[in-house]
Amino acid sequence: MLRSFIAFICLGASLMATEAKIVSDPKLPIEWLDEEYFDNIWKMANASCSQADFEGKNDWRTPTVKELKRLANDESFKKEFDSIADGLYWSSDEVDEFSAYAVYIGNGFVSENDKCDKYLFICVRKR
């Protein structure tokens, strides 16, 4: 328990350690928080987004599969980001209590993954 708490504190402290920016989505009514994140398990990724506070905006969350696929399939939009990497990103969509969906940003492939696996994540909010 203490180890998880310490990992969360370390992740939260690093959330805004580098230059971050907000990228407005031209096709969906959301904003993306372009920030470099560490790989993390599903629950911690969701918690990190829900506790993010950037430019006075504190209603961040992990994106849905639909939102991540939109990002993955738009090469020109991806160029707006400084911190996007080709890799699996957690979505907020769950399969069941043990699994959730992740989207590969390189091509939009959706996979079901164990929530204890570590993948990248990004935060979004409604505009």
Image (spheres, helix red, strand yellow):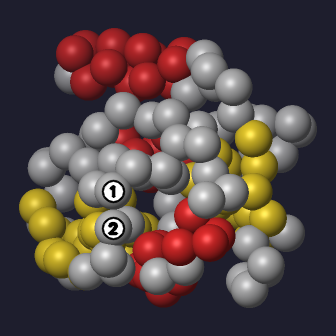
Query: Can you tell which quarter of the image residue 102 is in?
Result: bottom left
Place of residue 79 in the rendered image (x, y in percent of width and height, measured from the top left) = 61, 59
Q: Residue at x 50, y 34 (%)?
A: 36
Place of residue 77 in the rendered image (x, y in percent of width and height, measured from the top left) = 64, 70
Query: Can you tell which quarter of the image residue 37 is in?
Result: top left
Place of residue 122 in the rendered image (x, y in percent of width and height, measured from the top left) = 50, 52
Q: Is residue 71 visible?
A: no
Helix, strand or loop at mark 1:
loop
Pick the quarter of the image with the N terminus.
top left
Q: Is residue 75 visible?
A: yes
Query: Is residue 67 or residue 47 the one in the foreground?
Result: 67
> Which residue corresponds to mark 1?
86
Amino acid at the residue labelled 2: Gly
Query: Is residue 60 or residue 23 the one in the foreground?
Result: 23
Query: Is residue 81 or residue 38 the one in the foreground?
Result: 81
1 or 2: tag closer to the N-terminus? 1
Crowding at mark 1 (Cα within 10 Å: few <14, some 14-19, many 20+): few
Q: Residue at x 42, y 15 (%)?
A: 10
Helix, strand or loop at mark 2:
loop
Q: Residue at x 36, y 41 (%)?
A: 44
78 versus 52 height, above or below = below
60 versus 109 height, above or below = above
In screen coordinates, is 48 left or right of 112? right
Amino acid at the residue labelled 1: Asp
> Which residue corresponds to mark 2?
106
Q: Residue at x 53, y 73 (%)?
A: 75
In screen coordinates, is 78 left or right of 73? right
Crowding at mark 2 (Cα within 10 Å: few <14, some 14-19, many 20+): some
Q: How many marks?
A: 2
In screen coordinates, is 100 left or right of 70? left
Place of residue 22 in the rendered image (x, y in percent of width and height, measured from the top left) = 77, 49
35 versus 46 height, above or below = above
